[in-house]
Image (cartoon, rainbow, N blue to C red):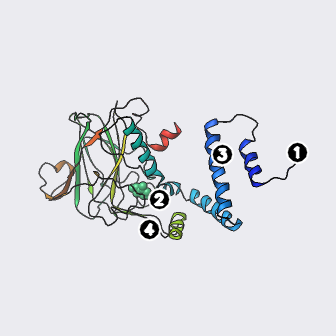
Amino acid sequence: MSNEFTATQLLERVTTSRVAPGNERVRKIADRIVGDLFRAIDELDVQPDEFWAGVDWLARLGSAGQMGLITAGLGFDRLLDIRADEADERAGRLGGTPRAIEGPLYVAGAPLARGESRLDDDGPHPGDVFVMEGRVVDTEGRPVAGAVVDVWHANEHGRYSHFDPEQPAYALRRRIETDDQGRYRFRSFLPPGYAIPPDSPTSELFTALGRHGNRPAHIHFLVAADGQRTLTTQVNIPGDTFIDDDFAFATRDGLVLKLEKNVAAAGYESLGVTGPFTRSRFDFVMQKAVDATEADPQARLARALA
Ligand code: MBD
Ligand code: FE
């Protein structure tokens, strides 16, 4: 047998050579992606210098911990949500708070509080005192007691604790368990938007693509309760210039908060509120889980690797 082959014969060899069955699904996906890349290299006449610069970029992207920034920035995270929405629609599963992307900056194990919490107790933080409050309910409007609302957002510099060595562990991250009426509330401040780190592999690509790397101001949630479908979502803070131009394409209608300014402090003393503050009311509506997997309270990576 000859060891000289054409590109087509090479692809055939790459995708069929094996000494064991391996994993059929992995093989199918890998073979497809390799085939698509062979074709792209051919059709675009990708030069060796371009190929190796790209490989180096991927290696640097991985060691910078920025894979999740790129999946979001190239639309893959939103794509998976669009596909999940379409599957729900086909299955007649309507209602509930819209899902929105988790993003790459979730950290499991935030401190757990009952009913209410401050997120900003590592502060002081500038800006208005902000309280978000509401209930977790099911699609019939019944309160979900004991739901865990895991919330995280950026600090005033647009950076997230854990990834930013300047912040204490779990700053601006909490889990809040709803009370017997399904209520949660927390105090924090209104975060600014997020911008991808400059001089990083991600910004290199975005500059080459002529794109910006800004997200509008937002707050993330992972809401979990027994028997309910785990909800990953985000809310946006109104008025941000990037609200309809998110680099991660993650803004959703129905998830832009309404803010009430100059609310009186009475009733909010337990959150350390002493003067007028900004409030937003928001209820999370959870769908019933159809199986245990849907009620898995874990975030995306832990789920994927379970
Ligand atoms: C973020 O804060 C974020 O939420 C996403 C999806 C990507 C980058 C930074
Ligand atoms: Fe974020």
Three-letter residue code for mark 2: Gly
Callout 4: SS: loop
Placement of 142 over or under 299, stated as above or below: above
- Residue 102 in view here: yes
Disc 4: CA contacts within 10 A as few (<14), some (14-19) or many (>=20): some
* Res. 1 mark: 1
- Whole-number angstrom distance, CA of label 2 to CA of label 3: 25 Å
Q: Quadrant of ligand 1?
A: bottom left
Query: Which residue reaches farthest right?
Result: 1
Callout 2: CB less than 8 Å from ligand 1: yes
x, y percent for residue 236:
30, 56
Residue at image position (87%, 48%) is: 2
Residue at image position (51%, 68%) is: 209
Q: Horizontal placement of 277 versus 66: left or right?
A: left
Mark nearest the camera among 1 and 4 is: 1
* Res. 73 mark: 2
Three-letter residue code for mark 4: His
Q: Horizontal placement of 66 versus 134: left or right?
A: right
What residue does disc 4 label? 212
Callout 1: SS: loop
